[in-house]
Image: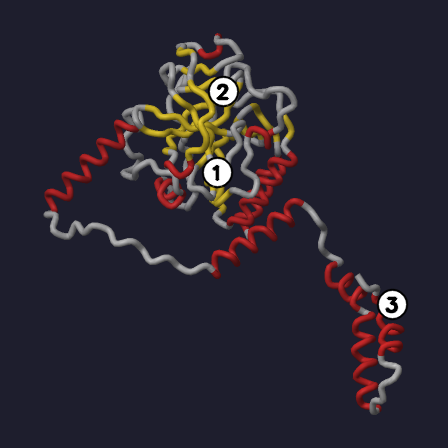
Amino acid sequence: MIEVEMLRPTADEMLSGLTAGEAMKQKMLFRASGVEKLGETATEMLGGLHASSALRHRILVKATRRKVSLSPVPTPARRPSFVRLTPAVGMALVVALMIGLGLNYGGQMPINGLPIENGMHTYAAGQLPGEGVPAYRSLFAGEGANPPLIGVNGRYYRMLQMIVPPSLVGTYSAEVTTFTDEPSNASAVGIVSNVLPIGTKIYEVSGLSYRTAYAAEVDGVMRLFQRVGYASSSLIGNETLEDTLDISGKVAALELSGVGVITDETVANDLIYSLLEFAVQSGSEVTESTQALTIYLQNNLSLQLLVDGDVLGGCGAWACPDFITMFTAALAE
């Protein structure tokens, strides 16, 4: 790269044989002085910026939005028409669909008249009390001390109410080798489950670390299993919260029950970045709670952490008072 200080003597040498009028000379001198001040101008304009992971994330988000805005809008595919269905037949189909959903979700019927879906546009809208504050609702399937689990070499994953679409089912990882009603008593080596029969294949989820989630078929439906702590078994080795919740830059929205919903994608990712960066492992586990942080991902899946004061429970318990404070402040803006 040519140094700015060399531009003037280089130009003098190259143009020494040329004759120009006074007006041309003044234009050339003006341009040269502008070039010499490029360094100073750039420093002044960028002086308030600090390189960080959060800044990098904002730049990537802006670039992605720009790319999407320039992409051609695909023509929607024509769908079969059901205009000829009578109201009675249509209602029968709706009832049959709702019953089918209840069976696929282990007997759970839709909540507040809404089907249990992955997207925030239906899930969050299901419970918004008078003041617009979301009420607590668990995404996890099953209750009690022995919920539906997969144990993968000492890491435990609890089944959620999320359906994983075929497009997000990643590479084949392993298959269940042991079926047991008490996974906590099983060996830390091997694939165990209290809900999946022996031989059931488990898969990685596209875009998520295997330390965060797996997918497996339950009663004909591909379900999402999220990493959790179980029976005093949580972290392995020197794992951090980010190791077990690898979602940085992948969040679409956040919902903190009893507080509010953050729908700005950039703000939501900044909050998650702060949580993953500054949360400190707490000594006590969060096993029961009436508050939760629901994390809506950009791929239309959802994860959830239990919340007890300023401690968030997922795989282990993590204290982060600043996260709760920043979440509340973001709602007020």
What residue type is disc 2 on? Tyr
What residue type is disc 1 on? Ile
Asked which secondary structure carries label 2, the reply is strand
Kindly identify which residue carries mark 2: 156
Query: What residue is at 53 percent from the left and 32 percent from the top?
Result: 209
Query: What residue is at 50 percent from the left and 31 percent from the top?
Result: 305
What residue type is disc 3 on? Glu
Q: Residues within 10 Å of mark 2 (few under 14, many from 20)?
A: many
Query: What residue is at 38 percent from the left and 20 percent from the top?
Result: 200
Residue 295 is tagged as 1
Image position of 256 (left or right of 163) = right
Is tag 3's residue or tag 2's residue first in the polypeptide sequence?
3
Residue 61 is tagged as none
Where does the N terminus fall, quadrant-wise? bottom right
Is tag 3's residue or tag 1's residue first in the polypeptide sequence?
3
In the image, residue 63 lies at what x, y percent?
A: 56, 55
Image position of 300 (left or right of 237) = left
Judged by depth in the image, the label closer to the viewer, 2 or 1, is 2
Kindly identify which residue carries mark 3: 5
Asked which secondary structure carries label 3, the reply is helix
Image position of 258 (left or right of 52) = left
Q: Nearer the viewer, residue 150 or 306?
A: 150
Asked if disc 3 and disc 1 are in contact, CB closer than 8 Å, the reply is no
Spatial CA distance of label 2 from label 1 is: 19 Å
Judged by depth in the image, the label closer to the viewer, 3 or 1, is 3
Image position of 32 (left or right of 76) = right
Spatial CA distance of label 3 from label 1 is: 53 Å
Judged by depth in the image, the label closer to the viewer, 3 or 2, is 3
